[in-house]
Image (spheres, coloured by chain):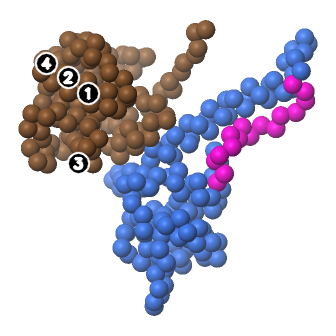
Chain colours: A blue, B brown
Amino acid sequence: MKLQKNTHLALCSVLEFAARPGTQLSAAEIAEKYRMSPHHLAKVLRTLGRAGLVRAARGAGGGYRFAGNTRRVTLMDVIELFEDISAPKSGVRRSGRRTKSEAGATAWEVEDAIGVVLLEIDEIAKATFRSITLETLLKLVARRRG
Amino acid sequence: MISLKKSAAARRTPGATRIRGVQPGDLEQVVEIDAGITGLRKAAYWGEILRRYGGARQQRFFLVADRGGRIEGYVVGDVRDWEFGSPPCGWVFGVGVRPDARLSGIATQLLDAICDGFRRLGVSTVRTLLARDNPLVLSFFRSQGMMAAPFIPLEKNLD
């Protein structure tokens, strides 16, 4: 599972908000920290807002604040907003015919076997994202900071 | 996998929950908790686990969370030496908490207690193995700092 740029940015943003619940952060602050375009980030934040993970704050300065539950929201909850994870994606283009051949494996059979392996990796990645909550990731950040 | 290098947090129990070794009289409640979680009543299995892990065993732990005589949860594990070439490490192969007692830190206390036991035996790592479609328990272990171990579980059908 390869995450798109928007997904990566969404994860970073949500973690920024989750680390300081109740604190209003501007899109500009986050964009600057992660060296992203504020315009790009604004679109990501709108999606997070529609999902109820952040709430736009009105008034002077504007900005957003966290609106989820760090112990319940998993990385997959965020990823699903930006990636199509419903269909299995092997990443392998299957060509040729499925018909069995006496002369060895067909292109389809070889690509199918490679697809099975890639699918296995994909399933492990999804299970990992489903098992890690925002709180757990914030703890990991803290541990790695020492 | 989790490193056990740091000393365990003190096991302070909210309410009057006490983490202690299992006793034969606890078994029915353990079976009940497990059946409530898995949908399978495995009295014979738990009887065997009690026989092998109950009491004061050197490398084996079967602990329960007791709140006023009611068993709220259990944890089972042992120290395994050189399994698949790995230096001795702690293994947790069973943990369960009553649904109505969750979110009160009982599983954390149970895990802390068994990790303390592992540490006393000189072990510095604890491992477990879970189905990847079990996000509840996976999330719990993740929240305790456990990360992917340097092992990959494999299987095949024996048809």
Q: Residue at x 12, y 21 (%)?
A: B25
The answer to which of marks 3 and 4 sits earlier in the sequence is 4
State the SS at label 4. helix
Look at mark 1 in the image and give the residue it sits on: B32
What predominant SS class does the magenta segment belong to?
loop
Q: Residue at x 36, y 73 (%)?
A: A22
Quote the CA–CA distance across marks 1 and 2.
6 Å
The answer to which of marks 2 and 3 sits earlier in the sequence is 2
Cβ atoms at labels 2 and 3 below 8 Å apart: no
Q: Quadrant of the N terminus of chain B?
A: top left
Quote the CA–CA distance across marks 3 and 4.
25 Å
Cβ atoms at labels 3 and 4 below 8 Å apart: no
The answer to which of marks 4 and 1 sits earlier in the sequence is 4
State the SS at label 3. loop
Which percent across, then down, holds residue A36?
61, 70
Label 2: how many Cα within 10 Å (few below 14, some 14–19, many 20+): some
Q: Which mark is residue B24?
A: 4
Label 3: how many Cα within 10 Å (few below 14, some 14–19, many 20+): few
The span picked out in magenta is A83-98
Q: Which mark is residue B28?
A: 2
State the SS at label 2. helix
Quote the CA–CA distance across marks 2 and 3.
23 Å
